[in-house]
Image (tube, grey):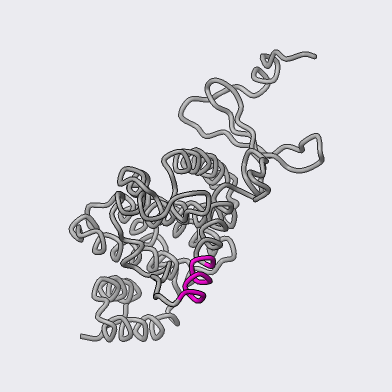
Amino acid sequence: MKRDLTELLDEWPYEPGQIAVRVIEGIDGQPRIQVRLDLGILQMNTDGRPDGKRPHGFDSLLDYFESKIDQSNLDSLDLADASDTPDHDPNDEVFLEKTPFDRQHEVSGPNSRFLTPDDCRSLREEAQQYYHRYIAMLVLEDYEAVVRDTSRNMRVLDIFRDHAITAEDMHAMESHRPYIMMMRARSLASQALKSEENKAAVLAIDEGLDALKKYYEMVGHPELFDESGEVAMLRDMRDTLIPKLPVSQRAELRQRLDAAIAAENFELAAILRDEIRMLGGRPHK
């Protein structure tokens, strides 16, 4: 069997500074994504887990651990119903916010709803596969796939936060959350633009900005919102779209402004005021 890849690499030269992506047909007739790297070619499935594996018979390790946690929660509820003594609700916030020490020692064994360091390492490696794929899909302008894979990786961050045993694993990927949120909002907006729905694109960006604002407030650093590169990226994208909105959108923007003020969402209200001014209308005081 011929194993040297030189001929294959020579026919698709690597270009520094560019993300080169193509779609080919696999030997099974199914599409595959290929990304040209400096040291070779990365190939991924377009659906399911990028490497095509089905760990424990599930589409991904994340699906496996989510199923395991769900089953553990159901088992705990069944035990509580069968017992004369009250048990905790497995979804109770107090229980989920236990310290890593309490998590490790309170629930253990094969039916544990908590993730060991090895579990978390495997999930991080799997999340990296999905990251490579959604970047490739962004280049291919398959925005629906980007939304799918970014939403999926957000679930990884959530499961770490709620179910990792160690403090290190609980926060290992949390710094990536703003970037993933931005990529998802950007792709939702780009998907709307492909359908020539500028209004829906602006709405997707506004919702992304609002979600980022709430995230920074939740982690106790609201000042980082205006310093965030992800926020700047979404704002720049929105600024290019606002002038393209038809004049007929002014009334609806004013309605959204009123709703934002009523909900005391003053960041969104400020955004909407700017949009109305750029359309040539007068915002409400």
- Magenta includes 182? no
Q: From the viewer's perspective, is 71 left or right of 83?
A: right
Residue 257, how many percent across, how many down? 31, 81
In the displayed structure image, the side of residue 273 where residue 187 appears, left or right: right
Q: In this view, which residue lies farthest toward the front?
A: 84
Front position in the image: 179 or 129: 129
Quarter occupied by residue 251? bottom left
Secondary structure mostly seen in the magenta stretch? helix
Q: Is residue 148 left or right of residue 237?
A: right
Above or below, comparing residue 3 to residue 46 in the picture: above
Which portion, as a residue range, is magenta? 74-83
Residue nearest the viewer, comparing 72 with 285: 72
What residue is drawn where x is 42% and y is 57%? 158
Looking at the image, is 166 positioned above or below residue 240?
Answer: above
The quarter in which the C terminus is drawn is bottom left
Q: Residue at x 42, y 79 (%)?
A: 247
Q: Is residue 77 magenta?
A: yes
Q: Where is the N terminus found, in terms of image quarters?
A: top right
Residue 258 location (% of width, % of height): 30, 86
Instruction: Estimate the x, y position of residue 142 in percent, counting from the top left.
Output: 60, 52
The picture places residue 67, in percent across and down from the top left corner, at 57, 58
Nearest to the observer: residue 101 or residue 175: 101
Instruction: Reply above or below: 79 against 41.
Output: below
Q: Residue shown at 66%/44% (left/top)?
A: 54
Q: Residue at x 60, y 30 (%)?
A: 42
Q: Nearer the viewer, residue 255 or 209?
A: 209
